[in-house]
Image (cartoon, grey):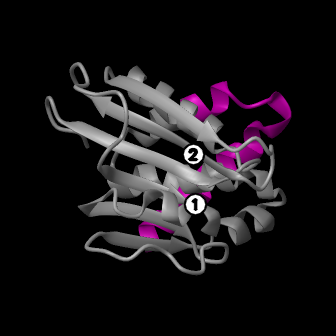
Amino acid sequence: MTTKDETREIRLSGSGGQGLILAASILSNAMMAEGRTVAQSQSYEPTSRGGLSRSDLVVSDGPADYPLVSELDYLIILDQVAVAESEGMIKEGAIVVTDSKTVTEPPKGNFRLVELPVQETAIALGNRRVANTIALASLVALGELCSTEILEEAVISRSPKAYVDLNRDALAKGFELATGA
């Protein structure tokens, strides 16, 4: 959990079409619901699918000193294309969650690397589009970024009715993967 007046920098990265900007927005809403200040920025290549995509959050209990990330405390990487973008920015002791299948050469450093079968788990649930939710749930659980109940509320509030149960299952799987990591 973020301690008083502590700032945390978070990046969700991968390729376009993986829903990482949406996931960052959901995490932002969950953290604001707990009373934190959040600045969110995003970057993506002009191609809608397959190009580099990332969304960054700077989170603080008070005003953030600077709204852009410079030293990452938490990182999700769901595609190999996104690895180079964050190397050199990962803080010592950070938590880095990668997809064990799509990130074949994860970053190296003095941080906690957690390689999880994110895409495989999403496919097993019946829809690869919930990989973002699985990864987000895993990161939240590993980093104790916000309460799991508030994260679930934030996810469900942004889910189309037809996908509420699937997203609940994706959250549960993400939390479960983090427990085994």
In the rendered view, would you say 73 is above or below 126? Answer: above
Q: Quadrant of residue 57?
A: top left
Q: Position of residue 149 (x, y in %)?
A: 47, 36
Amino acid type, label 2: Arg
Judge whether residue 156 is colored magenta.
yes
Q: Position of residue 44 (x, y in %)?
A: 65, 42
Q: Which residue is mark 1?
A: 82
Judge whether residue 116 is colored magenta.
no
Left or right: where 55 falls relative to 92: right
Tell which residue pokes out farthest to the bottom in this image: 104
In the rendered view, would you say 107 is above or below 146? Answer: below
Q: Residue at x 40, y 25 (%)?
A: 39
Q: Secondary structure at mark 1?
A: helix
Q: Do the numbered discs 1 and 2 sit on residues whose CB atoms are within 8 Å?
A: yes
Left or right: where 71 falls relative to 24: left
Say which label, 1 or 2, has the lower sequence index: 2
Q: Position of residue 105 (x, y in %)?
A: 54, 80
Q: Which residues are magenta?
A: 154-180
Q: Secondary structure at mark 2?
A: strand
Separation of disc 1 and disc 2 at Cα?
A: 8 Å
The label on residue 54 is: 2
Amino acid type, label 1: Ala
Q: Residue at x 57, y 60 (%)?
A: 82
Quadrant containing the C terminus is bottom left
